[in-house]
Amino acid sequence: MGGNTFGKIFKITTWGESHGTSIGVVVDGVPAGMPLSEADIQRELDRRRPGQSVLATPRKERDEVEILSGVFQGKTLGTPISMLVRNVDVDSSPYEDVRTRPRPGHADLAYRLKFGHVDHRGGGRASARETIGRVAAGAIAKKLLAAHRVEVLAHTVEAAGVKLERDPSPQEIRKNVERNPMRCADMKIAERMKEAVLKAASEGDSTGGMVEVIALGVPAGLGEPVFEKLDAEIARALMSIGSVKAVLIGAGCKFAEMRGSEANDPIALRGGRLVTKTNNAGGILGGISTGMPIVVRIAVKPTPSITKPQQTVDMVKMEEGKIRLRGRFDPNICPRIVPVAEAMLALVLVDHMLRAGKIDPVRFR
């Protein structure tokens, strides 16, 4: 199966299935000499780990990372870095019901129609556990970006119909996101989101939402004209996350309601630097970064695993019927997508900074 590798210079290849023995990633293109430890990776993996709150699947996985190659005496070697996480709390029994009956809203049907033979346990390769590799690789990307004063932040701005109706400051995002289970920058709105999510869950249903991802300190000049525009590659990266069904750059869909005089960002001088007074463009014009903050929102669909009965087809008997899922589910995926979205944006930015010569591809400096 193709499509498992992402990036041009900073490349990652994720591998593994939800109920296999382990899952992981190989990262190539990391400059030599960068300090890196398993603790650096674990910090990010702990943010996406299941079982952290009533809003996450109760599957109890420690998600402890092992670095197998590419690091010696605490520093990167410039060679491929291979990382592994072992699957521990695996219970495949609830998935026997779906061996021949694809679950509505899941990738089951598409995988079966394409490949025929699939791993039905926990969604196999299509499971959200695949994102472990993305987050592990993203931890390296974020550390490399931080050395060049670039920061990536994400937070939940909508869940279960409850919206954050103002733009929080980066300081609020840093302060509050890890203090509530919704990963929302506003603590009061976060509580309302939580109540709405749990209400739907008590009815055997799930909810969707919106996550915003921001990059601060991004230099101007990233991205290539036409087919390798920075916003196009960011959209591709974020759309590759399971359950993401739309990507909005800057003002996004609001552009459809604006006039040009409203949409265009006025250009000004600040301390001898060219800036825009507003940021409707989300930090990207003509597919190239302007030096303004990059602002992206992703629409996350409701968790497809619900306990309400749903219609499906037995693909062996070719008979319609009902299916009621058993297992351990997230009632809303937005909080756990936050670190994944950060990782994917970080991976795009590192790759483009290497391509633009903003980061030395050989030695960490």
Image (cartoon, rainbow, N blue to C red):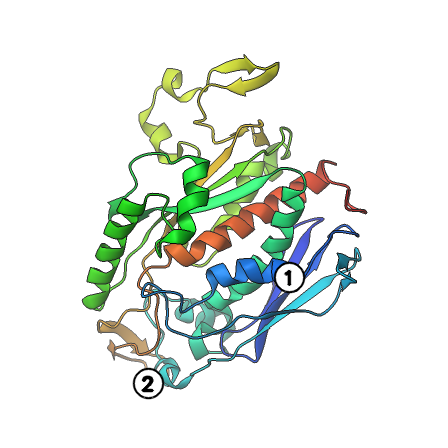
Q: Quadrant of the C terminus?
A: top right
Query: Which residue appears at 66% of the width and 40% of the height?
Result: 352
Looking at the picture, which amino acid does disc 2 mark? Lys
Query: Which residue appears at 78% of the width and 59% of the height?
Result: 79
- Whole-angstrom CA distance, mark 2 to mark 1, is 37 Å
Q: Nearer the viewer, residue 344 or 309?
A: 344
Look at the picture and state if 97 lies above or below 333: below
Q: Kindly state the secondary structure of the residue where label 2 is placed.
A: loop
Determine whether, in the image, residue 354 is placed left or right of residue 56: right
**Numbered circles on residues, count:** 2
Query: Which residue appears at 67% of the width and 47% of the height?
Result: 144
Q: Position of residue 318 (x, y in %)?
A: 32, 81
Determine whether, in the image, residue 67 is placed left or right of residue 266: right
Determine whether, in the image, residue 120 is placed left or right of residue 26: left
Looking at the picture, which amino acid does disc 1 mark? Thr
Q: Where is residue 273 in the image (x, y as percent from the top left)?
A: 60, 17
Q: Position of residue 241 (x, y in %)?
A: 48, 56
Mark seen at residue 13 = 1
| Quarter occupied by residue 320 | bottom left
* Res 297 seen here: no
Binning the other alpha carbons within 10 Å of mark 2 as few (below 14), some (14 to 19) or many (20 upward) gives few
Q: Which residue is labeled 2 in the image?
A: 317
Q: Nearer the viewer, residue 260 or 292?
A: 292
